[in-house]
């Protein structure tokens, strides 16, 4: 199931962004939202996911996203597990998820997670990148590629090349990607609280 974009046509209109090219607007909202989610490492908006992760000799397993609202359908190596408690974004058991020195088990679970409302700054970010994409289409795709600055008096243009070059104007800069990852904490599943 595809997630709804992180911003809407109404959000774009509220910022004075022209939304008359509906096909392009919808496409940009979808692609920019996907880029923001990819950078954050999590869906951000509320959804239900199923993940598989490896266990460790621990009583606590931290889930890879926040906030977690509920957990269902937990299996360990294909066998149902019901003796867990959800606290915050972690699953706790009174026993260990695996015995010491044992081969990690495959833990599969389905959980409801994410924010009920997309934060206003994320909505604005998506709208800003959509506007950049709309402008790029008007100017001609690829025009000014890599341009990092431009002056008018005694005309001067500066370009960035290599890893720092933005290929298109909807591409998220690395700094923005890092901030999203830090803020939303998206990461591969981790296990914390090993006991010895």
Image (tube, rainbow, N blue to C red):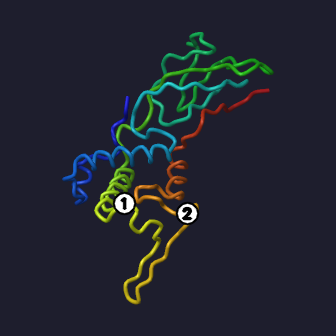
| In this view, 78 is above or below 150 | above
| Side of 141 relative to 159 (left or right) | left
Q: Position of residue 52 (x, y in %)?
A: 58, 24
Q: Residue furthest bottom?
A: 154
Task: Name the mark on residue 159.
Answer: none
> Mark 1 or mark 2, which is nearer the start of the sequence?
1
Which residue shows up at 47% across the image and 59% down it? 167
Seen from the viewer's position, the closer of residues 131 and 77 is 131
Disc 1 packing (10 Å; few <14; some 14–19; many ≥20): some
Quarter assignment of residue 147: bottom left
Which residue shows up at 69% across the image and 31% down it? 193
Task: Name the mark on residue 164.
Answer: 2
Quarter assignment of residue 26: top left
Q: Count every numbered label the image shows and give the total.
A: 2
Task: Name the mark on residue 141.
Answer: 1
Q: Position of residue 87 (x, y in %)?
A: 54, 28
Q: Position of residue 45 (x, y in %)?
A: 39, 38
Helix, strand or loop for disc 2: helix
Seen from the viewer's position, the closer of residues 171 and 155 is 155
Helix, strand or loop for disc 1: loop
| In this view, 189 is above or below 172 | above
| In this view, 148 is above or below 114 | below
């Amino acid at each position: 199931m595809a997630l709804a974009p992180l911003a809407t046509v109404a959000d774009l209109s509220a910022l004075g962004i022209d939304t008359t090219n509906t096909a392009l607007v919808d496409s940009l909202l979808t692609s920019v939202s996907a880029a923001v989610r990819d950078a954050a490492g999590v869906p951000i908006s509320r959804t239900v996911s199923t993940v598989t992760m490896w266990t460790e000799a621990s009583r606590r397993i931290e889930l890879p996203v926040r906030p977690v609202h509920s957990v269902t359908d937990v299996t360990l190596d294909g066998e149902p597990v019901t003796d867990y408690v959800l606290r915050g974004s972690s699953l706790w058991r009174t026993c260990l998820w695996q015995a010491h020195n044992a081969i990690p088990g495959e833990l599969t679970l389905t959980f409801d997670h994410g924010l009920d409302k997309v934060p206003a700054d994320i909505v604005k970010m998506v709208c800003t990148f959509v506007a950049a994409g709309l402008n790029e289409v008007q100017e001609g795709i690829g025009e000014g590629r890599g341009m990092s600055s431009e002056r008018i008096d005694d005309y001067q243009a500066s370009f960035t090349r290599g890893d720092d070059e933005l290929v298109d104007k909807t591409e998220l800069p690395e700094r923005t990607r890092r901030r999203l990852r830090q803020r939303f904490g998206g990461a591969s599943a981790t296990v914390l609280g090993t006991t010895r």
